[in-house]
Image (cartoon, grey):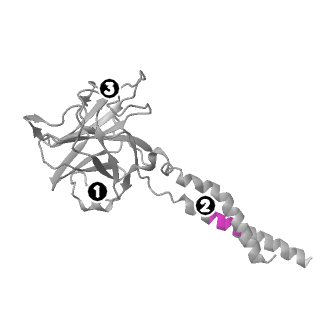
Amino acid sequence: MGYQKIFNVALGLILTVTGAGVSCVFASDPPPESGAGSVAVRLHLTDDAIPADDPNAAVWDTIQPAEFKLAPQVHWPDRIQEVTVKSVKVRGIHNGQDLAILLEYADPSNDAADAAAIEFMVGDKMAHFAHGQEMLQVEGGAVNIWYWKKEDGKATDMSAKGFKTIRAQDDQNVSATGAWQDGTWRVVFSRPLQTGDEHDVQVTPGEWRNVAFAFWDGEIVDGAVKERGSQKAVSSWWYFRAEPPPDNSIYGYVVLGIVLAAGFQFFLVRKIRRGNES
């Protein structure tokens, strides 16, 4: 067997072995297409400042949105059979310190009582998307809710563990800004990835978390607000993840493989030459 062929075989074997260490680089890939996480919000990583207070920043249009269907909330009174907001497009971005999530949805009128919310599970205990309400006699987990209302002009950071338990947190660290144009709301929420508050969702790049959405149409119909309280458009739980920093360890494994193959070739060639000389 020629020296070059020996080298190629050795390199292939070594890269196969070191490839086992490379597989961990892709461990944070989303669930398979058939799985529950096939539709998910990805918070893209950037080196720049995030557009925390600008729903119309140019960077949003460079991010592919995830779209989620919405339906009327029918689990608990007061129910509603028809809602204005039928779906929402969601984009996300983070810079390793802070995150921003943009909600874009159709609403034909700009009303003072228009509102939007993002809900997260807190901790490792499963919770129902309806404020973490107990279902089928099973205790649910707590949820963290980021709520924005047009007439307030800001976000409220809230916690809940079931209906009628929702409350504003003492530490308010979420901000939100909305902009309405041509029948479309764009609302951007922002917050640090980590807050240290046990009532908040803690976002670690590379980890999947659960998220849900809710919307209220504040149009005045027959002297009353059309959608308020439990009368709202909601989604079920979906997934989101802050994109982790790139892992360049794969290049280290490749370099290691080449060095080992070259060393193996040097050793083998030297041994063959000594054998021929004897």
Q: Is residue 245 left or right of residue 114?
A: right
**Looking at the image, which is closer to me, 136 or 45?**
136
Q: Amino acid at mark 1?
A: Ala
* Residue 110 to residue 161: above or below: below
Check the image and name the residue furthest to the right: 278
Residue tagged 2: 253
Task: Please tell me whether mark 3 or mark 1 is closer to you in this view.
Answer: 3
Q: Which residues are magenta?
A: 255-261
* Residue 78 to residue 43: above or below: above
Residue 189 shows up from this direction: yes
Q: Position of residue 142 (x, y in %)?
A: 36, 29
Q: CA distance from mark 1 to mark 2?
A: 33 Å
- First-in-chain label (3 vs 1): 1
Circle 2 residues within 10 Å: few <14, some 14–19, many ≥20: some
Residue tagged 3: 162
Q: Amino acid at mark 2?
A: Tyr
**Looking at the image, which is closer to me, 89 or 108?**
108
Q: Disc 2 on helix, strand or loop?
A: helix
Q: Main secondary structure of the magenta part?
A: helix
Residue tagged 1: 49
Image quadrant where one finds the C terminus: bottom right
Q: Classify residue 14 by image quadrant.
A: bottom right
Q: Amino acid at mark 3?
A: Gly
Q: CA distance from mark 2 to mark 3?
A: 50 Å
